[in-house]
Structures are given as structure tokens and as C-alpha cells.
Amino acid sequence: MGKIITENLNNDGVDRRGFLKCMAWAGTGTLCLLQGGVLKSFALSEVANMDQSKLKGDLTFVQISDSHIGFDKAANPDVTATLREAIAKINGLGQPPAFVLHTGDLSHLSKASEFDTLDQTLKSIHTEKIFYVPGEHDVLNDNGEQYRERYGKGSFGDGWYSFDQKGVHFIGLVNVMNLKAGGLGSLGKEQLEWLEQDVKSLKSSTPIVVFAHIPLWSVYPEWGWGTDDSAQALSYLKRFGTVSVLNGHIHQVMQKVEGNVTFHTAMSTAFPQPRPGTAPSPGPMKVPADKLRGLLGLTNVNFVRGKHTLAVVDSTLQG
Amino acid sequence: MKTAISKLILAAAMLGTLGWISASNAGSGASAATAQGAAKSQEVVVKIDNFSYMPHDITVTAGTTIIWVNNDDIPHTVVSTNDVFKSKALDTDDKFSFKFDKPGTYEYFCSIHPKMTAKVIVQ
């Protein structure tokens, strides 16, 4: 039986503390769902036996990240295989996601063959559309020209864009270009100006989802895990009731809630990286073979119209 | 006058000896012809590993070629902050070389992981 958490802190029907508790369980495969303004949690194992129609929201989509096609070192010699396993998980969900977001590092070395393999592999996802933002590994040697040719149709500048689905406004940002020595991720003046205009005429009640590769909050600057000018971007979104920020880059789940903004990073489908400060550098982390799939995975996001937060579920490739 | 000359002779002898030592220790690219000739075709290796350049700060004489080798399991680049040199993305075991002819300080970083910074001082 699902546990019901009811902590209506701000008297606005938003169960924020309950949501936080739920998020803390996320890594172990928990489904948190907002239904009638109340947050309920279900272990994924229970979910399998439940009436799936009870779990429907208005919009469901999946985020995958950091597939690094082309990587073949000790941490995972076959990243295409683990990507296929993630796709099998997506295809095994109760209802197919409306679309998939890939938050970057599609390839490992920006090679044409790597992008080709990715495209070929992603063809087997049962979904209508896949949206992308580039990672720093996708824009090597050519300033992202190849990336934009393949995945940037209809985008602006280095590849940023927005779209709407079921009343939710999605914004894809690029923060991996023109990086400065000693700096973090960077959005740049042109993109910030575009963003300000893009959201200007939206009603404050419009739910916003921002997705970008490098985290838009300061996870661990020593390892480059942050974006120098994200504060300005977030200032344009301050007035909105619900803002969800979905990122990748760090190859592990991290989350933070700050007022109306929920930040969340996804696991990689390719290889794990160490927790902040627990290793000399943020590179690929080799783990025993039987532990690998417990550290790789995807994120399922469920949005219920009229409610204030998205339900975010991370699940690993294990089991 | 005599002391000055003898000091000069001593200095020349020492330089000659140093030149001979560096010529015999230098890598495959060095020529053993003269002291100056050996210094000009000198090669020095900077290793890239664990998201760092080692050594972090390096001082070399003008005419030295630095060879960067990526020993990390993730690609990196070598990009000068004032557009003097720029490598392609280096995968594990890939190399990039640049010959430093002009004296000066050359700061550089990895354009993929910009927190990785280092410098070359050319004398």
C-alpha cells in the first residue's frame, strides 16, 4: 500500500516537504506521484502490481543523459549495450513517454560514427520525439557544427530552443560552449537575452522545465560542476509558480529545492562518476561489474495538470 | 683584466660542459653538435592525468618543443588563453606538440574541462 505524506507547509496545496522526502528515496526506485494535491509514494516493485491507470498524470516524459557513445575504457567497455538496457526500461514503462529528453554528452568524442550509432540505437525507443541539448563531448573540434546539423534544427545560436507540451513550457539551454579558463559552464549574453524574451509573455502559472547539460546550480565548482551565469537565467524564471531544472554531466542523481525551483540531475547510461570530493578527479569511476548497473539509469517525469510540482523518479538499470 | 678573462674562460668551459651534459641527456630529437644546438631542439613532456597537467607550471628555454601526452581515461585539450596554440581533442594516449620560440608566459587550459589550467614559462 502506498504511503501518504501530507505536509501542506505553505497552505498552497503544494506538499513540498513531502516532495523532498520523496526525492530522497529517488535513487532506490520510488515512484512519487502528486494526486489531488497530495504526494503519494510507491516502491517501484508495488507499482508493477498496481492498476496503471491510477498512476497516470497529464504528461509523462523520460530524461536520459550522458550516453558517451564511443567510450570504451574500464569503467564500461560497452556503453551502447547499457544504453540499450535503458531503452528497454523505457519501453517497459506502463505508458510510453510523450517524448524523451537527452541532456547531453550523446557522444564521447564528437565523431560522426558515434552520433550514427546513437541515432541507430535510439530508433528503438517507443516514443514520439526525442529532444537534445549538447554536452561538452558533443562540440569538440568544430564548435558544435556537426551537433547542430544533426540535432539542432529549429534552434538558435549554439543550439538553444523552447517548445510547449500540454501547457508546460520546455526550454533547452546550451552551457558547454565558449568555456573560459578556470570557469564553469556558461550560457552567454546572447542566450540569456533570448531566454528573457522567450518567457516574457508567459503567464506566471505556466509550469517551466529547463534542461541543460551542466548543472545550473553550484553542485561542486572545484570539479566544474556548475554554471557561471545561471543566476541571471534563473532571475527571469523567478516569477513562475513551478520551475524544474533537469541536468546531466555529473553522472549521478543530485537534487535541490530552492523556493519554486527544483533542480535535479540524472544518472548516465554509460559510466558513473564519484560523489563530490571523494576522488582526486571527476572522471569515469570503475566499480565491480555487479555494481555497475545499480549506478546507471534514467529519469521518469510525471506532471499532473493543476498541481505545482513534477513527480520525478530515477530508476537504475539493475533488476 | 686578467681575472675577468679567466672568469670568462671558466664560464665558457662550464657552458661547454653543461652543453655536453644536456646533449647526452636530451631525448631523441636533440643534436649533440653544440651546447646551443642541443638546447634549441629540446623536447619536454607534459603528462595529462586525473584532470591535471603535470607539471602544472613548467619553465623551458626558447626553442623547446613541449609534447603533451594524455594518460587520462577521458579526452582533454590543450588551449592557450591568448590563441597561441590549440590542440584537437586528445583521447587517451594521443599527443600534441608545440615549439615555443618566443620568451614569455603562456597560460593554457582544457576547453572541455576549463577548471584544468596550467602555464608554460619560456625564458
Image (tube, rainbow, N blue to C red):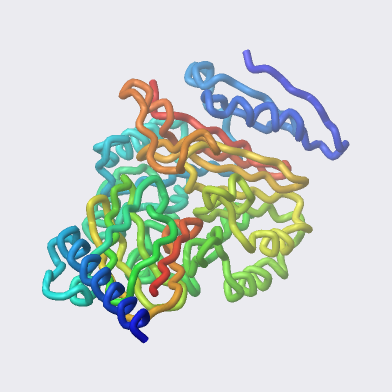
Q: Nearer the viewer, residue A295 or A300?
A: A295
Which residue lies at the image location 41% right of the left edge and 43% below the top edge?
Answer: A283
Q: Position of residue B59 (x, y in %)?
A: 39, 65
What is the quadrant of residue B122 in the picture? bottom left
Relative horizontal placement of residue A278, taking residue B42 as reference (left or right):
right
What residue occupies the far top of the structure in this picture? A1
**Is B52 above or below relative to A74?**
below
In front here: A202 or A296?
Answer: A296
Compared to B80, does A224 lie above or below?
Answer: above
Residue A265 location (% of width, % of height): 55, 43
Instruction: Count the labels in the image.
Output: 0
Q: Residue at x 50, y 37 (%)?
A: A252
Q: Quadrant of the N terminus of chain A?
A: top right
Q: Is residue A77 left or right of residue A310?
A: left
Instruction: State the quadrant of the C terminus of chain A.
Output: top left
Relative to B42, B106 lies left or right = right
Residue at image position (51%, 33%) is A278
